[in-house]
Image (cartoon, rainbow, N blue to C red):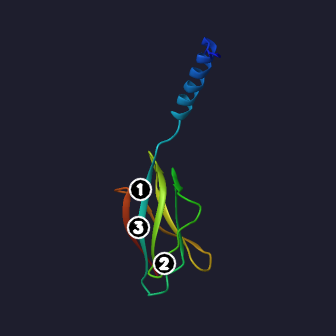
Amino acid sequence: MCRATITNSTWLKCLGVILICVVLCSFLIPTIETSVTGHLRSKSHKDVSGFTVFVKGTGVSMIGLDMPHTDKNGNFILAFNVGSEPGDISFYFVNKLHDTLLLNRVNHLISETTEMTFWIK
């Protein structure tokens, strides 16, 4: 019959690994997942479908690899992470000529799910 015994040095190694993991995880910056339901509208009634919309800012990172595009009515959903102390959040869109234009800049979002309408000429 074979008996496995755990020595004190094995326990210390396991405890050391757990302690290192706890210390490293304590340095992770907490983020808040935020989504914005947006509407891109044109004052001159131009076609606003197929535009790429994205956000940039301090402590802001997009979720996923694909950037959302506006549908045939100009509607889109942005999902992004916001750090615990975010700075300004800038909303951009890329038109069909590949020009990147600033839609709006906000200091903070009121809730984790926000609805916004952006008007362009």
Q: Which residue is mark 2?
A: 71
Q: How many marks?
A: 3
Taking the spot 53% from the left edge, 29% from the top edge, the residue there is: 22
Q: Amino acid under label 1?
A: Asn
Q: Amino acid under label 3?
A: Thr
Q: Nearer the viewer, residue 116 or 22?
A: 22
Which label's residue is closer to the chain start, 2 or 1? Answer: 2
Q: Residue furthest front?
A: 1
Q: Helix or strand or loop: what does disc 3 sit on?
A: strand
Taking the spot 53% from the left edge, 73% from the top edge, the residue there is: 69
Q: Which residue is mark 1?
A: 107
Q: Residue furthest left?
A: 110
Which label's residue is closer to the chain start, 3 or 1? Answer: 3
Residue 28, position in %: x, y?
52, 39
Q: Amino acid under label 2?
A: Asp
Q: Which mark is residue 52?
A: none
Q: Which residue is mark 3?
A: 37
Taking the spot 44% from the left edge, 87% from the top edge, the residue there is: 44
Q: Helix or strand or loop: what does disc 2 sit on?
A: loop
The answer to which quarter of the image holds residue 100 is bottom right
Look at discs 2 and 1 and give the one toward the viewer. Answer: 2
Determine contact: label 3, label 1, CB under 8 Å.
no
